[in-house]
Image (cartoon, grey):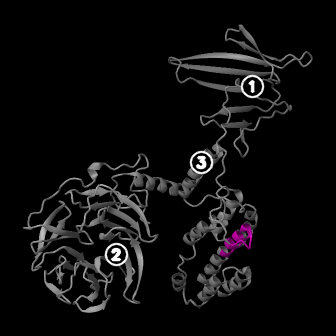
Amino acid sequence: LRAELRLSFTLTPPNTDSGAGGALQFAAASGSVGPTLTAPEVCLSPWTCQLFVHANGGGQDRDSELSCRNGTQNGESSSTVAAHSNGLISVTNNGNAVSNNNGVAAQPASNNNNSSSAADGGSGVKKKKRLSQSEEDVIRLIGQHLNDLGLNQTVDLLMQESGCRLEHPSATKFRNHVIEGEWDKAESDLNELKALMHSPSAIVVSTDHSKPDTLLHNMRMKFLLLQQKYLEYLEDGKVLEALQVLRAELTPLKYNTERIHILSGYLMCSHAEDLRAKAEWEGKGTASRTKLLDKLQTYLPPSVMLPPRRLQTLLKQAVELQRERCLYHNTKLDSGLDSVSLLLDHSCSRKQFPCYTQQILTEHCNEVWFCKFSNDGTKLATGSKDTTVIVWQVDMDIQQLKLMKTLEGHAYGVSYLAWSPDDAYLIACGPDDCSELWLWNVQTGELRTKMSQSHEDSLTSVAWNPDGKRFVTGGQRGQFYQCDLDGNLLDSWEGVRVQCLWCLSDGRTVLASDTHQRIRGYNFEDLTDRNIVQEDHPIMSFTVSKNGRLALLNVATQGVHLWDLQDRVLVRKYQGVTQGFYTIHSCFGGHNEDFIASGSEGKTKLINCPSVENQ
């Protein structure tokens, strides 16, 4: 049900002689004259207007439409002002839209040079909302993302309605010339952009104080442009043109002469594939030019040209921050955004974390002294006082362990195990009074090597070299050996009482904790050693993260300590572990090694989060 009330009103110009303002008279449909309203700010020729007020239901969702017609019949121009829901005003003059660059509506003009304006609060037309800097930034980010998706018309409409500018016009022209491969025009555009480069908000900041940042950035951008131009000439077989660019344009810049020498070597490439391979270049086309443009954008402040894919970068940072703050996050790292929902905050439930017993293994008949998963996670080896090692197969589907092999004959029991890098071999060591170690073939269950240098030795710890062809072993009686897979002695280090060993990924350095409450790095190639970690109490055992950056130490009477091996600083101490002088091993855990697990003399387990970025 819709009721329509038609009113007509007349605006009369003010009396300029008396200074009185104009009057607004309403006339109902029956012709009766309503009250007269004074409008002192209105100065118009006689206009006849109709106001249509539509009422819908109980007064909800009312719409109002204001249309103005020139009452004269002499063909004067008409103007219409329309208010939109986004707060912006569009102005139509004889059917033509008129607006300026910042989104402010242009005022209509009539042929008789009379100007018009709306009284404050009396016109019903919404004024354009002034956007804050953050709002403009968000609009530009959205516009850039839409532009990357190819929604160019949507971007144009967004910029038009918001009054914002996606990037500086000179930057837009420069972008188009680079993508189209018009190098002379792009080089000319650099002169226009030179004045815009001097900004502290530019991504790349110069470290060469002998030249102003603006000149240096301009030179770098020109160098990148000419380099692309040179490579494209070479790919097209235009060797003379490429040589001219190299001699007459790149060399006179006197910038990055080392790179120019490398570029000159590409003249010897016999075909395009050889050129792309040696230059590590995608070849002529959109891919390489887009990559070039990404580099060029780093020299321009974001007010001129936004950094590439800026919105995606911010979203990735937000997702990563939420993951870091998630206490139970334990999934593989994925730098993409497709694996997460941007509509909800990231949160992992405690139920997703391994907090419950899945299986109890009872095949050993005495104390279990050590257990270790293989590097690929498909097998588990357990060593016991009952003189056996049992290798278990992990069934990934049902999350259960199945007995795979039983390795027997360790007379003193098994207190330490080490998998080879390819998980093909397993080395077992005994307690302090054991002078032997066993090297097993895991697949066949055959003993490949039983090594013993002397009955007085104590071989209690072992670590594999990353090449899988060598290992180091030692003990607290001063033995420190490097051997091959057949147990042959390759090198030895005399007088080092070893408590625990670890080989770093460089293949040369071996970390060893000794009886001097320290961890030292030993190089068997040049026979040098250096101090890495110094504690105040005995280091009973330690383990190193996969990236070789962090070390987890079990320190007598102190508990578990986390060290940064690169910076050689103590990062964190963990509470809750009862650590005496027994050898207790801790380990990193989780998909990204974000957690640690440690045994305790109080028959408890500690699972904690290191809260340290493993960079």
In the rendering, at what x and y percent does residue 469 appear?
28, 86
With respect to residue 447, does 534 lie above or below? above
In the rendering, at what x and y percent does residue 27 appear?
71, 12
Which residue is painted at 63% across and 84% down in the image?
258
- The label shown at residue 404 is none
- What amino acid is found at the position of numbered circle 1 in the picture? Ala
Tell me the CA gap for discs 1 and 2: 88 Å
- What amino acid is found at the position of numbered circle 3 in the picture? Ile
Is 215 inside the magenta-drawn segment?
Answer: yes
Mark 1 lies on a secondary structure that is loop
Whether residue 99 is visible here, answered yes or no, is yes
Please tell me how crowded label 1 is: few (under 14), some (14-19), or many (20+) other residues with Cα within 10 Å: few
Q: Nearer the viewer, residue 254 or 417?
A: 417
Looking at marks 3 and 2 on the same chain, the residue that comes earlier in the sequence is marked by 3
Q: Dot 1 corresponds to which residue?
A: 119
Mark 3 lies on a secondary structure that is helix
In the rendering, at what x and y percent does residue 108 appear?
77, 34
Looking at marks 1 and 2 on the same chain, the residue that comes earlier in the sequence is marked by 1
- The label shown at residue 516 is 2
With respect to residue 155, does 65 lie above or below? above
Residue 414 as seen in the image, left or right of residue 497: left
Looking at marks 1 and 3 on the same chain, the residue that comes earlier in the sequence is marked by 1
Q: Dot 3 corresponds to which residue?
A: 139
Whether residue 153 is visible here, answered yes or no, is no
- Magenta-drawn segment: 208-223
- Residue 283 image-quadrant placement: bottom right
